[in-house]
Amino acid sequence: MFPSFANSFFGTRRLETDLPPLVPQFTQILDILKTILDHLGVKWVILTGMTKVDERQSLVDEFTNDSEIKVFLLSTLAGGMGINLTAASVVVV
């Protein structure tokens, strides 16, 4: 089941057109998603509550400007600052 779900959800064709930020509440889910994305060879960036404030904008810029990065992993607990992901075409919460 895992490979078929991962391939249908994160399939290469879909990631060519959709740039999804994935926004779970718990960082353990992000750890699982990182493993899945790595397994599929999908490049990603991550922002959690542990990400330093001065590093956050560079991650957003990297996601926006690097067409190789297909997924932005973002914890809902990484609030406190406005995060503007204008490059995202799909949001998965």
Image (cartoon, rainbow, N blue to C red):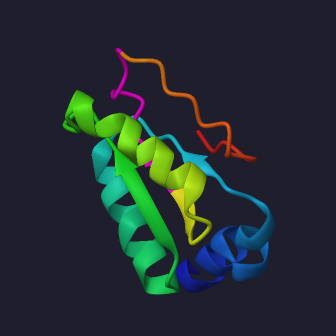
Query: Residue visible at 47% across and 42% down?
Result: 60
Q: Position of residue 39 (x, y in %)?
A: 44, 84
Q: Position of residue 34 (x, y in %)?
A: 38, 66
Q: Main secondary structure of the magenta part?
A: loop
The quadrant in which residue 91 appears is top right
The part of the chain drawn in magenta is 72-80
Query: Residue visible at 68% across and 56% down?
Result: 19
Along the line of sight, which residue is nearer the eye, 89 or 32? 89
Q: Position of residue 37 (x, y in %)?
A: 47, 73
Query: Residue visible at 39% across and 36% down?
Result: 57
Query: Residue visible at 57% across and 72% down?
Result: 68
Task: Specify whether 2 is left or right of 74.
Answer: right
The quadrant in which residue 86 appears is top right
Q: Position of residue 5 (x, y in %)?
A: 64, 74
In this figure, what is the number of numbered marks? 0
**9 relative to 53, above or below:** below
**22 relative to 5, above or below:** above
